[in-house]
Amino acid sequence: MSYEWLLSFIQQFGYAALFFALWLGIVGMPIPDEVIVMTGGAVTAGGALHTLPAFIATYLGVVSGLSVGYVLGRWFGTAALDRLRRKKKFDRYIDFSEKLMQKYGSFALCIGYFFPVIRHVMPYAVGSNKMTFKRYALFSYTTGLLWTALFFTLGRLVGEQVQQVGYHVYELGLKALWVPLTLAAVFAIWHFTRKSKGRGKLWP
């Protein structure tokens, strides 16, 4: 599926296309969420759709799609994550999500929104850890509103450049994912080296 397909889908089905394009993210939609949400903003700036209903359809598509992950994680527990792990590319994202949960608790949902892939993995993780739906909705839906507003507005601003800007933002998000992992690895190596030196002093 190409970006041209997305535009054609929106032209044909309007607001419903924005909703389902984002909801289908749970099955691996090849077009990043950032690009779809920004496109929603861009088409309203061009007058193809009205701003408010387009934003509502986009927001509902984002939160409902992610909520499916939460429900699957809640119902099937760790089996849902194990199924994701069978796809080797998800291993590092699941590990990252679990580290975020251990360090930040419920706020990991808020942080996860701003990392591609993690955004979809995190609901599975918190669901399998039996977070209540009320708590999930509080953190996920409020952050989702802010996240959607940010990229929807950005799409309105960049207009016809939305495809290039959207994919660039997505790539930056993937690269940013490695920053905390790299820092953690450096710290672990430094800590291990320091302890090794300490043991060397005790045992000359």
Image: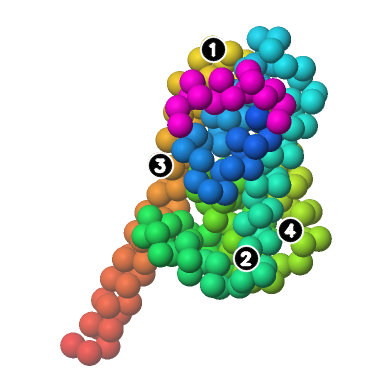
Question: On the image, numbered disc 4 is attached to which residue?
Answer: 136
Q: At label 3, which amino acid type do we have?
A: Lys
On-image quarter of the N terminus: top left
- How was this image coloured? rainbow
Task: Give the crowd class for mark 3: few <14, some 14-19, many >=20 residues within 10 Å.
Answer: few
Please say if 147 is above or below 119: above
Q: Residue at x 53, y 60 (%)?
A: 97
On-image quarter of the C terminus: bottom left
* Sequence-first disc among 4 and 2: 2
* Sequence-first disc among 1 and 4: 4
Marks 3, 2: nearer the viewer: 2
Question: On the image, numbered disc 2 is attached to which residue?
Answer: 73
Q: Quadrant of residue 35?
A: top right
User: What residue span does the magenta drawing correspond to?
Assistant: 1-16
Q: Are marks 3 and 4 in contact (CB under 8 Å)?
A: no
Q: Residue at x 66, y 30 (%)?
A: 18
* Sequence-first disc among 3 and 1: 1
Tell me the SS state at disc 3.
Answer: helix
Tell me the SS state at disc 2.
Answer: helix
* Sequence-first disc among 3 and 2: 2
Task: Give the crowd class for mark 4: few <14, some 14-19, many >=20 residues within 10 Å.
Answer: many
Q: At label 4, which amino acid type do we have?
A: Tyr
Q: At label 2, which amino acid type do we have?
A: Gly
Q: At label 1, which amino acid type do we have?
A: Glu
The circle drawn on residue 160 is 1
Q: CA distance from mark 3 to mark 2?
A: 27 Å
Residue 184 lies within the magenta run: no
Percent position of residue 184, x then y: 41, 60
